[in-house]
Image (cartoon, grey):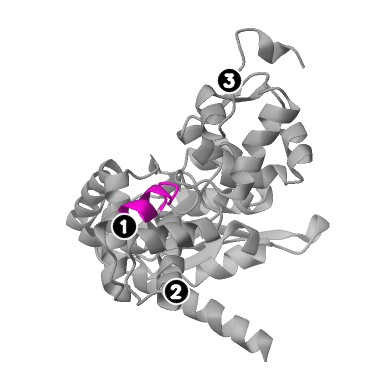
C-alpha cells in the first residue's frame, strides 16, 4: 500500500513538472541571448526548408536545456525523440534510434558527456553525412553496411562539456551555455507556475521563494510546491511571507538557498582545512559526500554566490562564506597555518 502511494506521488510530481514546462517560445523566461540565437537559426532553416544544425547546450542542471530542445522541435513543427547518454549502452541501441527517425526529427540526448567512445564513433558519420555504418560479423568475414539516414537534428545537453570529446564537440553547428537566472526572471517563472497550479501567493512570499531557489527554475518550482503544501496544512492555503519562511526553515534552506549539504561543505573547508585551499577528494571525505555530487550540485551555485573559489591548489572559502556562517575571517597569512 505504501509503495503504491509513493509511486502515485512520483507520478503526480512528474505530471506537474510537465504541466509547468513552457509550451511556447514566448513562455520560456530568461536566457535571452540563447533564445534569440536559436530563433534566428530556426527561422533561417525554415526559410530554406531544411533541418537546423546540430545544437549543443551546456550548463548546470535545471536551467531548461530539455525544455529548449522541446521548443526547438515545436518551432520546427516536427517530432522529438528523447534519450540519454547512459541509456545508449550498445551501438545497436543508437542504430535502432537513428533508423527510426523521420525526416526533420529532433533527437535529444541528455547527459551527452556519458556517451561511450564506441557510440561517439557511430555518431560522427551520422551527424556529418547522415550515414550509419553497421558492422556485421567478426574477424575476416566481417563486412560493413552503410545506411542512409533522413535529415535530422541532434540536440545534446550536458552539465560537463569538458568531458565531451573534441571530435564530437566540433560536429555541432552551434554551442550555447545556459547561465543561472536572475532574481527577476525566477520571480516571473514562479508567478507563471503559481497561476498554473492555482496557488495564492503574496508578493513578499514570492520574493522569498525566488531568493532561495538557487537561481534555478527547477528548484524554484520544487520549492513553490513544498511551500504550497505547508500553507495548505498549517494555514488557510494562502502563501504569505511568514508561511514561506517557516516552510523553507523546515526544509533546512536558508535565505541564500543553501541547503544543509552546502553549509556542511563550507564549514568543512573552514573548520577542518583552515579555509583552504584544499583538494576536492579531501572535502568529499570530510563531508561524507561523493565528488560527483559536490561538483555537479553544490559547487556551481556556491561559486556563483562567491562563497568558494577554485584555485590551482584546491578550493578556498571566501570572506563572504565566513560571514554567512557567522565566523571570523582569518587575518592575512593565517590560512596557511594548518
Does 6 sit left or right of 48 as displayed?
right
Residue 26 visible here: yes
- Residue 126 location (% of width, % of height): 50, 54
Q: Which residue is located at x 36 percent, y 52 percent? A: 208
Q: State left or right for residue 194 relative to residue 297.
A: left
Discs 1, 3 touching: Cβ within 8 Å: no
Q: Are marks 3 and 2 in contact (CB under 8 Å)?
A: no
Whether 323 is among the magenta residues is no
- According to the picture, the residue beneath numbered tag 1 turns out to be 206
Q: Nearer the viewer, residue 328 or 199?
A: 328
Q: Name the residue under label 3.
A: 329
Residue placed most toward the observer, 179 or 161: 179
Tell me which corner region of the image, top left, top right, bottom left or bottom right, holds residue 166. Answer: top right
Number of marks in the image?
A: 3
* First in residue order: circle 3 vs circle 2: 2
**Residue 281 disc label:** none
Q: What segment carries the magenta color?
A: 205-216
Real-space Cα separation, disc 2 to disc 1, in angstroms? 18 Å
Q: Name the residue under label 2.
A: 234
Question: Helix, strand or loop at disc 1?
Answer: helix
Quadrant position of the N terminus in the picture: bottom right
Looking at the rendered structure, the secondary structure element under dot 3 is: loop
The Cα atoms of the two marked residues, 1 and 3, are separated by 33 Å
In whole angstroms, how far apart are the C-alphas of marks 3 and 2?
Answer: 40 Å
Look at the numbered disc 2 and give the secondary structure of its residue: helix
Amino acid at each position: 500500500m505504501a509503495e503504491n502511494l509513493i509511486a502515485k506521488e512520483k507520478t503526480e510530481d512528474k505530471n506537474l513538472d510537465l504541466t509547468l514546462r513552457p509550451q511556447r517560445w514566448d513562455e520560456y523566461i530568461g536566457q535571452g541571448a540563447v533564445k534569440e540565437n536559436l530563433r534566428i537559426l530556426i527561422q533561417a532553416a525554415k526559410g530554406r526548408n531544411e533541418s537546423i544544425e546540430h545544437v549543443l547546450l551546456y550548463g548546470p542542471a535545471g536551467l531548461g536545456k530539455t525544455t529548449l530542445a522541446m521548443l526547438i522541435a515545436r518551432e520546427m513543427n516536427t517530432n522529438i525523440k528523447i534519450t540519454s547518454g547512459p541509456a545508449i549502452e550498445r551501438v545497436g541501441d543508437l542504430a535502432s534510434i537513428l533508423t527510426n527517425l523521420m525526416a526533420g526529427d529532433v533527437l535529444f540526448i541528455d547527459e551527452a558527456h556519458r556517451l561511450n567512445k564506441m557510440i561517439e564513433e557511430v555518431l560522427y558519420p551520422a551527424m556529418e553525412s547522415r550515414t550509419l555504418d553497421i558492422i556485421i560479423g567478426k574477424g575476416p568475414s566481417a563486412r560493413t553496411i552503410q545506411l542512409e539516414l533522413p535529415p535530422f537534428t541532434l540536440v545534446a545537453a550536458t552539465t560537463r562539456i569538458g568531458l565531451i570529446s573534441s571530435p564530437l564537440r566540433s560536429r555541432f553547428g552551434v554551442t550555447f551555455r545556459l547561465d543561472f537566472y536572475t532574481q527577476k526572471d525566477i520571480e516571473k517563472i514562479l508567478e507563471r507556475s503559481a497561476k498554473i497550479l492555482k496557488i495564492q501567493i503574496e508578493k513578499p512570499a514570492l520574493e522569498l521563494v525566488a531568493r532561495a531557489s538557487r537561481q534555478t527554475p527547477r528548484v524554484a518550482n520544487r520549492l513553490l510546491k513544498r511551500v504550497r503544501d505547508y500553507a495548505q496544512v498549517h494555514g488557510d492555503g494562502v502563501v504569505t511571507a511568514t508561511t514561506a519562511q517557516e516552510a523553507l526553515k523546515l526544509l533546512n534552506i536558508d535565505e541564500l538557498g543553501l541547503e544543509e549539504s552546502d553549509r556542511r561543505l563550507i564549514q568543512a573547508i573552514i573548520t577542518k582545512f583552515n579555509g583552504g585551499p584544499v583538494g576536492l577528494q579531501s572535502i568529499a571525505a570530510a563531508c561524507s559526500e561523493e565528488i560527483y555530487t559536490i561538483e555537479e550540485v553544490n559547487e556551481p551555485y556556491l561559486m556563483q554566490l562567491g562563497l568558494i573559489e577554485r584555485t590551482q591548489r584546491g578550493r578556498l572559502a571566501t570572506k563572504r562564506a565566513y560571514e554567512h556562517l557567522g565566523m571570523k575571517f582569518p587575518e592575512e597569512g593565517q590560512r596557511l597555518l594548518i
